[in-house]
Amino acid sequence: MDGLIDRAVELNVQQVRMSEHFSGMSMDVDELVRTVARLRQQIRALEVESEAQIHDGRSKRAAGRAIEDGFDPLKCTNTPKFSEFPVHWRKV
């Protein structure tokens, strides 16, 4: 009978230890889920920033080419005046 009681106490102690271990694992999994969510947000922010930089670079290159071609978007001096259009176009 003493052996059964000792064995029951030992099983109870092991059950408590396993319960504590699983509780700790549950907290670790929760933290991992939060970390993955934060990483996803950071990756998305990096994607948005990268796309903006790519777009900005393209815009700057296009503006640079326009300036090299003699076009100044602020002055728009390359736009012909109405008087410079052929006469048959002005009659419209």
Image (cartoon, rainbow, N blue to C red):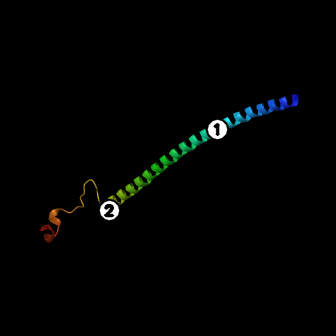
Q: Residue at x 23, y 58 (%)?
A: 77
| Label 2, label 1: how far apart the Cα atoms are | 64 Å
Question: Percent position (x, y) of residue 11?
Answer: 79, 33
Q: Residue at x 14, y 67 (%)?
A: 90
Front position among marks 2 and 1: 1
Q: Residue at x 35, y 57 (%)?
A: 63
Q: Residue at x 42, y 51 (%)?
A: 52
- Badge 1 element: helix
The three-letter amino acid code for the residue at tag 2 is: Asp
Question: Percent position (x, y) of residue 69?
Answer: 32, 62
Q: Badges 2 and 1: C-beta atoms under 8 Å apart?
A: no
Residue 66's disc number: none
Dot placed on the residue nearer the N-terminal end, 2 or 1: 1
Q: Left or right of 32: which side holds 45?
A: left
Which quarter of the rendering shows the N terminus? top right
Q: Left or right of 18: which side holds 50?
A: left
Q: Left or right of 53: which side holds 72?
A: left
Question: Percent position (x, y) of residue 33?
Answer: 58, 42
The residue indicated by pointer 2 is 69
The residue indicated by pointer 1 is 26
